[in-house]
Amino acid sequence: MKQFAYARPADREEAVAMVSGSPGARYLAGGTNLVDLMRLGVAGPDLLVDVSALLPSGVQEQPDRGLLIGAGTPNSDLAADERIRRDHPVLSQALLAGASGQLRNMATVGGNLLQRTRCVYFTDVTKPCNKREAGSGCPARTGAHRDLAVLGASEACIATHPSDMAVALAALDARVHVSGSDGDRVLALDDFYRLPGEDPSRDTTLKHGDLVTAVEIPLASALTRRSAYRKARDRASYAFALGSVAVALEVSGTTVRDVRIAFGSLAHRPWRARTAEDALRGAPATADAFSAAVEVELGAAAPLPDNAFKVPLARNLAVSVLSALLEEAPR
Amino acid sequence: MTATTDAPTRTGTHPRVEGLDKVTGRARYAYEYAADEVAYAWPVTASVGAGEVRGVDVDGALAQPGVLAVLWHGNAPSLADVGDSKVAVLQSPVVAFRGQVVALVVASTSEQAREVATTLTVTYDSREPDVVLRADHPTLYRPESVNGGYSTDSVIGDAVAEFDACPVQVDATYTTPPEHNHPMEPHASTAVWGDGRLTVYDSSQGGNAVRSTLSTLFGIDRELVRVVTSHVGGGFGSKGMPRAGVVLAVMAARQVDRPVKVALTRQHLFDLVGYRTPTIQRVRLGADPDGRLRSIDHQALEQTATVEEFAEQSVAATRVMYAAAHRRTAHRLVRLDVAVPSWMRAPGETPGMYALESAMDELAVATGVDPVELRIRNDPDVDPETGARFSSRNLVACLTLGAQRFGWAGRDPEPGVRREGRWLVGTGMASSTYPTYATAASCRAGVDPDGGYDIAINATDIGTGARTAMLLVAADTLGVDPSQVRVRVGDTDLPQAGLAGGSMGTTSWGMAVEKACRELLEAVRAAGGVVDERIEVAVDTKAEIAAQAELSRHAFGAQFVEARVDIDTGEVRAPRMVGMFAAGRIVNARTARSQLIGGMTMGLSMALHEEGVPDAAFGGFTNHDLSTYHVATVADVGDIDVGWIDEVDDDVNTIGTKGIGEIGIVGTAAAVANAVYHATGVRVRDLPITLDKTGQLA
């Protein structure tokens, strides 16, 4: 394993300064993804700045502004939080659908947002990958792509983002708090992730040295309280999604009053299905309407031979969860 | 969760004798033995799919901190040729497959060795690899024989002509992917040279083969080599013979004149320790309308490496399963630029019985005969190919009792019609079989004046409970309480015995233990029944093995599965499985139950999850870890209920055991696939049965 330095700065400012000032430095929190990538040679930092002790941990209620989740909060703690389970069940369910109990105990909210794709070419340094090594090529299009992107991909990259949690956060309109060398800022999750385009090396819009300090989710509502996450994968537990969906639904009589739909494992980022949402708001709350709206959203899909199944899978996931939420909705 | 039948007379039940050592960390595994001045070696593996190594930057690597040696074929010591490419490491420039060992870095710490190994500059002449098995491959050939010494082809009558004449025909092709062994403990070795002697602590299924191979490779007298295998964390066939890791450890230790440890990583295991060949199998069954088979035709296409032939005996089980006058079975291979396939979890029976038992289900559908009844109707009285008598054959009892236990009676054969909520529900079954092997073994048994008995035999306990089984065989023969007997295994200093493989450990070792204990009792009787001083006997079973009559020796079983398929996602679950086995005498009910449940779990895993994915562009496999090579998790395993019949077989061998290590896996995948068909109406003929294949994602 490559030699590297390890530092535990006293506070956030010092941490940001250390990483900002050193191109080879990386933040370390739970380490559940970074350490694996270091073992594989995919990541080779020369300085690890351990922020696990100084990132805020826990869920804080902010009057009139919703919940502020410390970036150092273990995934398992967040999943178990009573307010999350009651008011934002989609988030708790998404967290519990991810990884294993042991990993969720170690993994932090900030690290979960920033985990890298599990594309088999990205994790194998003996093969080309544009995300790992710009310009080296993407063998996935003609190779192993069964679990890769069907939406928003580019010629350069068809990687998917592996997080379950981020899909729920996308549906909840979460915002990400970031500390950088220029100070603090808050980004909508939509502006946090990006599509690969011609530069797949970057998963997010963050600059080197930016530190995720918290995630904010807006005030709970009737919509967020009736929300759910469903994930389909190659085994019952401990596998990344082949497709997943985070959904929230509010109905008024027989009409959709408001709805949120976000897909996981279809793209380089959580895929907020705004086209489908717009089509459904005010539409009849029926399985047929759900299906039609989602079909329009997925009309943009450009699948490859081995991942074409993801399109009907995503549709079925969304329709099944919307229908289940509808059944339990008060009229 | 599970239940077993009432324990028959000679079945004991005893916890693992080393259980406490294992759960408290006292049990030492190969990598954990301390040695002074130990160094660490890290294999460098080929990053091209095929070609030749041109050069290695040895000087650059030696300049790195802690590096003691860098070996490659250009400077590695010559090894004697033992005709096994897997241990002929660093002997040739040829890169036969991606992931092959091309160099070795030895350093003072594991971290140094690993860092230098992963950054070592190796130059190659490479060519495009050919790694994909396909039915129309132009270089398919007929191997001389297949693994286990079985004949490549077997032809009785005219299977094709008879098939053409049959009123009911099933003609289907089934495929299985490469499957990897992945024991919990990856392969590891600690090699120590001293005073001209070599001691190796090795993670192996059999130390004697390791000793023989090392002694020949390195030209050292057998008696000067000791291989210790006290505790081994699983093998599944991949540790059945010595492999690259142990040879590299010994080579490096000699080179740097220090003890050396080598531990393979999970990534290495995909390429360096064997795997199951993918198979393409065509099965043709011709039958009368009542389901009676007239013709059985089963051909398997498999792959092997360019540097070595391994031909899995995939259709061997078809030769013993069912009666039919006309039969043809055959194996064909293609040499590809792939790692050498090898023994993996019931080699032969596992993929072959997936195909045969799926085809039998298709025949049941075609004839309208119940799948259990169909198998009973075709059960032969004698071995259908050799005409030999079965030492015992209780497939029908397994089918009948298993069906009762599962609640098979009254099953509606109509597929795709049962719904519970969002699940389609179905049931399926399949037969199991595994041959009973035995090899000669030697054993020492002694008794001391304090009344303590001790047994010494170089058996290997790879986590199966072998120590405990030998303890119970000894106590049963001696007529004493197990607490009076001590068993030593896992060391070539002990009397020689064969490997833990082929489901023959308990039989082969047990025959020797039983004989030693009998002779010890006679020696005690001859001494007047008084033990004033230690009495010891040493035996071997060469005569017993040589004297075995020409019989057909096989264990049998029947498996039943309930499968559920999600109508939204196509995901498959198997909430309930029943296995009923007839495997001769069961020595230890407690560990036997675990082994059978484990076998069925592996079968479930094969059915739904396991898939090595060849990398057509770069060679090797695209998946290289357990997050991309899925095995069943606890959440995938439902209620597994295993039982066995009290099969007394005095003819099979001198202790009446048939072996239970592998039969649990055989047939499970077919039972799952058949249940998925019953649930959905979709016949999946291509493992694993992933959600995209179950017909729900239109």
Image (cartoon, rainbow, N blue to C red):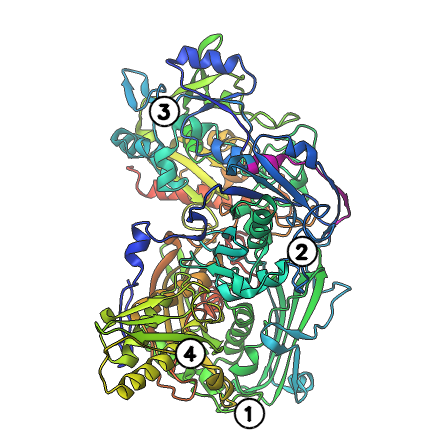
Q: Are marks 1 and 2 in contact (CB under 8 Å)?
A: no
Asked if the stretch drawn in magenta spans residue B55, the answer is no
Mark 1 Cα shell of 10 Å, populated few (<14), some (14-19), many (≥20)? few
**Which residue is found at the position 29% from the left and 50% from the top?**
B24
Q: Residue at x 35, y 41 (%)?
A: A101
Residue carrying label 4 = B658
State which tag comes first along the sequence, 1 or 2: 2
Residue A295's image quarter?
Answer: top right
> Which residue is at 55% across, 25% downward?
A194
Q: Residue B443, how many percent across, how many down?
A: 40, 75
Chain letter for mark 3 = A
For badge 1, the amino acid type reads Gly
The residue that label 3 is drawn on is: A72
Judging by the rendered image, the residue that carries numbered circle 1 is B387
User: Helix, strand or loop at disc 1?
Assistant: loop
Q: Amino acid at mark 4?
A: Lys
> What SS does tag 3 mark?
loop
Q: Are the residues flagged by discs 3 and 2 in contact, CB closer than 8 Å? A: no
Label 3: few (<14), some or many (≥20) within 10 Å? many
Q: CA distance from mark 1 to mark 2?
A: 39 Å
> Nearer the N terminus, badge 4 or badge 2?
2
Q: Which residue is mark 2?
A: B338
CA gap between label 3 and label 1 equals 71 Å
> Which region of the structure is painted magenta?
B113-129
**Looking at the image, is A55 positioned above or below residue A282?**
above
Asked if badges 3 and 2 are on one and the same chain, I answer no
Can you tell which quarter of the image residue A122 is in?
top right
Host chain of mark 1 = B
User: Image height check: is B439 above or below B183?
Assistant: below
The percent position of residue B108, horizontal first and vertical second, equals 53, 37
- Tell me if I can see residue A117 in this picture: yes
